[in-house]
Amino acid sequence: MRLSLLLVLLLAACASPPPPPKDDSLYRGLGELPGITRIVEGMLLNAARNPRITHHFDDVDIERLRDKLVEQFCVEAGGPCEYSGDSMEESHKGLNIDRGDFNALVEDLIDAMAAEGVAVPVQNRLLARLAAMRGQIIGR
Amino acid sequence: MCTRLIVFLCGLLPALAGAEQGRLLATGGATSIDGAAGGGILPWAVIAGYGEEGEWGGSSFLTRVETGDYRLDVGGLALSYGNRVELSYARQRFDLGTLARDLNLPDNSLSQDILGLKLRLFGDLIYDRLPQVSLGIEHKRQRDFRVPGLVGAERDEDSEAYLAASRLLLGGAFGYNLLLSGNLRYSRANELGLLGFGGDRRDKHSVLKEGAIAVLLNPRWVVGVEYREKPDNLGFAGESDWSDLFVGYFPNKHLSVVLAYARLGEIAGLDNQDGVYLSLQGSF
């Protein structure tokens, strides 16, 4: 009896796989789209003033970069966005970003999040998502 | 004189630092009492200063531990390259205070020099799949051997090695960044080497375990605990394992301060040597 019930449940589960509940707590923690936009803009402003990495942005369409970064951060945070930009490898090709440059941008991002009043554990969650991309970004 | 020189170098270091400082804040650690980058009473796998690939880094420090009966003063310098290799020098001066008075000892302080070399073998503190693993070698020379010789120490100079693994887990402690660090040390130093090396009870190197756990409350503030196993080579008195509870403050890449409560147990026959640890570091 119990076994057949289990089988029925199992079959039902197979027939219509429930979509995994999307965890958007990080997205909300960052202040949703308006918050993420302010964080990205803050980070880009900090980077523009950062002598170590400002030259990487010389020939870049900053508005497009901002829009793509907002999309990307939104997706990474579990928000309702779609990333329409190039792959990380593609978008950093020829820039020769080294480990130190990567860290410099991380620090500019941390400062921007702190300025937005984002709680440290929430900051760390986003940083962990982005840190995983480091291999696709440096040395291209 | 030596202290004054170090204070001067402390002041000079930031000026030298046209350096790039490609590493994140606090990832150069503080300076341990052996002179190697790390925590307070033990080194970690981190490399001194803030240099990344192709960059120089460095640090200088002054540390005082005050237990009531004893006082330990340490000062030193470290230079690093490419987040790969670190060369360090430290001078320790251990003030015997009470003990020298009570026993009419020929010296009222014991000093030693420590030359250290640390090499990052593989891994990364934050990013790679593997934790940062470093191999350290320390050569220590005890400079006042009369008292250690009297109490049974075998030699005034020795080398020791340690293998260190450190990892910063992003969000690892309820969302806060968690640092885990562990060492295996191969040593026969008595009380760091201040009481010489090897002894009447045991004259072989021992494998000693050391570890640290720390939480970064934000990029500038860190709290943690450390534990350091110690050998027990001398017959005249026991030697206790050490532990500490510390708070570190890294306002920027040029300055850091560590304040700790250290439990040093029995030292040279005097028990319950608990005390305050304070360390200042300049870095680039």
Image (spheres, coloured by chain):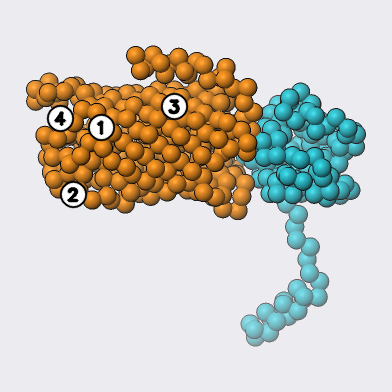
- Quadrant (top left, top right, bottom left, bottom right) of the N terminus of chain B: top left
Query: Which of marks 1 and 3 precedes in the sequence?
Result: 3
Per the model, the C-alpha gap separating discs 3 and 1 is 18 Å
Per the model, the C-alpha gap separating discs 2 and 4 is 19 Å
Is B213 on the left-hand or right-hand side of B143? right
* Visible residue check, residue B112: yes
In the rendered image, the vertical position of residue A18 relative to residue B27, given as above or below: below
Q: Amino acid at mark 2?
A: Arg
Q: Which mark is residue B77?
A: 3
Question: Is circle 3 on the same chain as circle 4?
Answer: yes
Q: Chain of mark 2?
A: B
Which colour is chain A painted? Answer: cyan
Q: Amino acid at mark 1?
A: Gln
SS assignment at label 1: strand
Q: Amino acid at mark 4?
A: Arg
Q: Residues within 10 Å of mark 4 (few under 14, many from 20)?
A: some
Q: Which mark is residue B142?
A: 1
Q: Amino acid at mark 3?
A: Leu
Residues tagged 4 and 1 counted as in contact (Cβ below 8 A): no
Residue wearing tag 4: B146
Residue wearing tag 2: B202
Per the model, the C-alpha gap separating discs 4 and 1 is 10 Å
Question: Is circle 3 on the same chain as circle 1?
Answer: yes
